[in-house]
Amino acid sequence: MRKQNMNRDWIATARTLSEALPYLQRYTGAVVVVKFGGNAMGDDEAMADFARDIVLMRQVGMNPVVVHGGGPMINDLLKKLGIESDWVRGKRVTDKRTVEVVEMVLSGLVNKRIVQAINDQGGRAVGISGKDDDLMVCEADDPELGFVGRPVEMNVQVIRDLYNAGIIPVVAPVATGMNDNETFNVNGDTAAGAIAGALQADRLLLLTDVAGVKNKEGEVITQMTPDEVHGLIADATISGGMIPKVETALKAVEQGVRAVVILDGRVPNACLLELFTEHGAGSMIRSTTPRVTPHAR
């Protein structure tokens, strides 16, 4: 009985690989920006699974670019250092001391942990931040929030150079300011959207801790156009923390990203399910809704 079960598993695996072939061909040479964050970053097994997926994407001819956050790790170190934060409208004020901790955690601890995880799975990863080669130049998003940045200039050639050399770029969302060599903390989703737009990426995958954008009945909406997204915001179907994510998606699509997908990063192999299966995963936002075909996504 055990041997029969194993045989069925092998057959199912072979069938899955065979069915994935059109999608593997479809994404050869494609640039896919992946925003990585949330609970998966603090779990070694989830980190290894994510890294394995990224290495596989590279192995089959895609150009993955990883952009990460690290809020919980920043909070932990601020607490250990006894640095208290002020808040404005529910958002942390990032002063000079805080932004130094942010850079230390994001460009150091978190970035290198992801790089190591990818290298451990047989990939070639290099960690950089938005400061490197002036990749991301920012101005203050809101003067009341201090050193929280909004990208105003993108110089993504360093990323192209890396993936053209077969290397997976891992980008920390810390950026250069326009004046006096300032350092800015940039929201991870915002940074990923700006990088994807500048690269004219085929896909931007925003990994979150929810299944996607849901309708009023609580069901995940699999595909949306910008007009439909605006309507869902207007009638409060999309609310709270999902609003900035869909706004990032809308801006990325406007800048030329072919499609943005908001999906649950807690699901094993979430990126592979989205890219290499017929039905994908999560909620896709694109400028037009394609005809329903096996290759619609």
Image (cartoon, grey):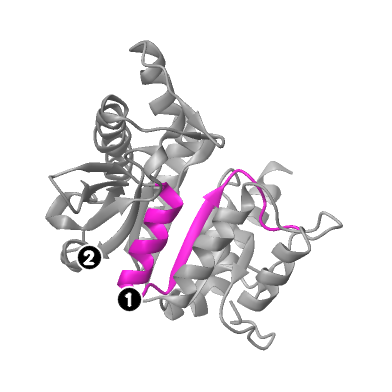
Residue at the (42%, 55%) spot, across then down = 190
Write down the region rendered in magenta.
187-214
Q: Earlier in the sequence, mark 2 or mark 1?
A: 1
Between residues 271 and 35, which one lies in front from this camera angle? 35
The amino acid type found where label 2 is placed reads Val
Q: Quadrant of residue 255?
A: bottom left
Secondary structure, mark 1, is loop
Judged by depth in the image, the label closer to the viewer, 2 or 1, is 2
Determine if residue 43 is in view: no
| Magenta-drawn stretch contains 205 | yes
x, y (%) of residue 230? Answer: 66, 70
136 sits left or right of 260 in the view:
left
Between residues 292 and 158, which one lies in front from this camera angle? 158
x, y (%) of residue 237? Answer: 77, 59
Q: Is residue 108 above or below residue 37?
A: above
Determine if residue 95 is in view: yes
Q: Which residue is mark 1?
A: 29
Q: Is there a contact, CB below 8 Å, between mark 2 and mark 1?
A: no
CA distance for labels 2 and 1: 17 Å
Q: Residue furthest right?
A: 217
Residue at the (59%, 71%) spot, across then down = 285
Between residues 88 and 262, which one lies in front from this camera angle? 88
Marking on residue 116: none
Q: Residues within 10 Å of mark 1 (few under 14, many from 20)?
A: some
288 sits left or right of 237 in the view:
left
x, y (%) of residue 29? Answer: 32, 76
